Image (cartoon, rainbow, N blue to C red):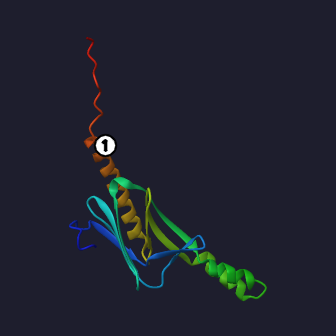
């Protein structure tokens, strides 16, 4: 978490950073991403070898969250070009059964992504906690927003 942030995390998850290549998400080889649910926001802290990313999304701005899984397109490509050989079937089996999983938190203009490690359950619990906290924050925001004042005209 950023040293300037005074909020403590309620719950957090961590995994590999995600990178997008050719329209698909893949986990990065190096680095670490931590998503933390704080009282009023979700904090992403990603560290890579030569880069660092820190972002915050207010809970009132969370649009949705998703768990997604996809195969590595390299296995599909290798399977298709070596299909006449027996090894092509092995590559296709690996493509369909070894999936990369990601947890994605969406807001209007930003997405926070972490590659899921072994236990999918803790990421699903985190996603549920984020969505519940976002619903609560949005309902509190609606009750605190003052109603627009109507201008009254007096007949003179």
- Name the residue: 30% across, 51% down: 137
Instruction: Point out the residue furthest to the top here.
Output: 156
Quadrant containing the N terminus in the rendered view: bottom left
- Name the residue: 26% across, 60% down: 39
Q: Please, is residue 37 above or below residue 45 in the view?
A: above
Q: Please, is residue 153 above or below residue 117 in the view?
A: above
Q: Please, is residue 113 above or below residue 64 in the view?
A: below
Q: Is residue 15 left or right of residue 37?
A: right
Give the x, y percent position of residue 106: 44, 60
Q: Is residue 140 left or right of residue 51?
A: left
Give the x, y percent position of residue 32: 39, 80
Q: Secondary structure at mark 1?
A: helix
Instruction: Point out the residue furthest to the right here.
Output: 84
Residue position marked by numbered label 1 in the rendering: 142
- Name the residue: 32% across, 56% down: 133
Q: Where, by quadrant of the figure, is residue 77 drawn?
A: bottom right
Viewer-side residue, 42 vs 86: 42
Q: Where, by quadrant of the figure, is residue 33 drawn?
A: bottom left
Q: Where, by quadrant of the figure, is residue 153 drawn?
A: top left
Give the x, y percent position of residue 144: 25, 43
């Amino acid at each position: 978490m950023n040293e300037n942030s005074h909020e403590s995390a309620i719950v957090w998850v961590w995994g590999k950073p995600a990178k997008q290549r050719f329209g698909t998400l893949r986990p990065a080889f190096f680095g670490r991403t931590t998503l933390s649910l704080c009282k009023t926001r979700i904090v992403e802290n990603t560290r890579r070898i030569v880069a660092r990313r820190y972002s915050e999304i207010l809970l009132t701005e969370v649009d949705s969250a998703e768990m997604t899984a996809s195969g590595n397109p390299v296995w599909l490509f290798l399977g298709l070009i070596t299909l006449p050989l027996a090894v092509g079937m092995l590559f296709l089996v690996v493509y369909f059964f070894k999936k990369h999983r990601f947890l994605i938190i969406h807001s209007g203009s930003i997405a926070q992504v972490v590659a899921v490690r072994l236990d999918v359950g803790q990421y699903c619990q985190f996603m549920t906690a984020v969505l519940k906290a976002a619903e609560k924050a949005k309902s509190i925001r609606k009750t605190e927003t003052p109603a627009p004042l109507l201008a009254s005209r007096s007949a003179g």
